[in-house]
Image: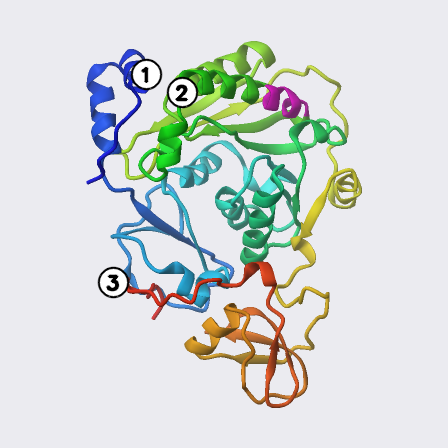
Amino acid sequence: MIIMQLPSDFIALMREQLGVEQAEALFEGLQQEPTVAVRFNPLKTVALTLNREALGDPVPWCPDAYYLDGRRAFTFDPLFHAGAYYVQDASSMYLAQILRKHLPLKGVRGVLDLCAAPGGKSTLLASLLPEDATLISNEPIRKRAQVLAENMQKWGRPNCFVTQNYPDEFGAFPDSFDLILADVPCSGEGMFRKDPVAVSEWSLDNVHQCVARQRDILRSIVPCLRSDGLLVYSTCTFNHYEDEEQVRWLQQEYGFQLLEERHFFPGRDRGEGLYIAALRRTEDATPITTIPEGKEFVKRLKTLNVIADVSNFNYQLSPSGEQGEGFQLELSYSDSIAYLRREALHIAAPRGIVCVTYRGLPLGLAKSVGNRLNNLYPQEWRIRTTYSPSEPLPNFFL
């Protein structure tokens, strides 16, 4: 049980907007422990067998996803670093259900995840979209963009680019995307039981500042959505100002058709707080241009700050751009952890660049000098702690 002192203005606002009964149920839910869920990478785990005894119930609205009975020491699982699975709030995975119901994925050519860090929804998109669809995963904040790039490269997907741009810098993409996901910055009410800072920083003034910022973002990005395209708008908030009222504004200002909206409330739903809405663009405010395909998308990408081209990243690239010649070296668990800490490994191997693996999945590159492997794992990705976990390690695969 979490003991949390909620802001008095938040309590009053929720009682006003949700009604006393639903608000009190929300306050009680916010005092409960957060749920934990994982989603597996179907491209990387196809040859591995799930250990169902280590997993809880399936997440009903998302394939390859399961609840857990508590957190694990994910940092110390090499398969986590290899991109075999992603730890994600189950509520956020409802995106899979939205797309199943409202977007025929087979015909999708261009997708933009506008505020994508740290990568939960983008890795989900990467698993669901057809390979010939181009996915742009964007994050304007540099530090967060680097985390996004790491997660997307570890997950792996053709035709995927990570960019670091602000919404108003997508001017080269008018009427270009079949799907835009706008998981916009918000007041963070849905993160209260995970992040004490979100509680201390909440205020009504901050809520209204977020509303203005969200509208600026939407004004910039709506012209990039093609006619009949799908906009998925989401926040991790409960209040109507940032949620329902923003969607009504989109309908009135741009003629969007609301297809579905849903709130997730801790205590009522098995996940954190989330609002998500699916809207269809039906109004032709600007002339519809030819939707860019393959090479044209890549050409337009030159107008953006592309920080990672996942399309050409097979996770066997070193920071210097060297590429292995196909030789792979399977590591033990202890050697894998040492490798992920960027330590040198005293292992004999043929001289040259080798790809080191754990349970058949690539972790990265090393350079063999005969009786030692010089570590080429990216410095910024390394496990920084020497702590040995006391909690149970993940055991998701037999």
Read off the residue under disc 2. Answer: 203
On the image, numbered disc 1 is attached to which residue? Answer: 9
Compared with 88, 393 (above or below) is below
Q: Is residue 225 above or below residue 132?
A: above
Q: Whole-percent x and y of residue 286?
A: 73, 17
Q: Amino acid at mark 1?
A: Asp
Residue type, label 2? Ser
Q: Secondary structure at mark 3?
A: helix
The quarter in which the C terminus is drawn is bottom left
Residue at figure coordinates x 45%, y 16% from the top left: 205
Q: Which residues are magenta?
A: 216-223
Q: Residue at x 76, y 31 (%)?
A: 172
The answer to whether residue 375 is above or below residue 300 is below
Query: Position of 107 compared to 335: left or right?
Result: right
Could you say which quadrant of the image residue 71 lies in?
bottom left
Q: CA distance from mark 3 to mark 1?
A: 44 Å
Q: Amino acid at mark 3?
A: Glu
The correct choice, above or below, for 234 with respect to 61 in the image is: above
Residue for badge 3: 53
Residue at 33% in and 45% down: 59
x, y (%) of residue 307? 69, 48
- The reply to whether residue 15 is visible in this rendering is yes
Magenta stretch: dominant SS? helix
Q: Of marks 3 and 1, which one's residue comes earlier in the chain?
A: 1
Residue 210: in magenta span: no
Decide: marks 3, 2 in contact (CB < 8 A)?
no
Q: Position of residue 123 (x, y in %)?
A: 52, 48
Q: Within 10 Å of the Cα at label 1, are there few (<14), some (14-19), or many (20+) other Cα atoms?
A: few
Q: Position of residue 334 (x, y in %)?
A: 42, 77
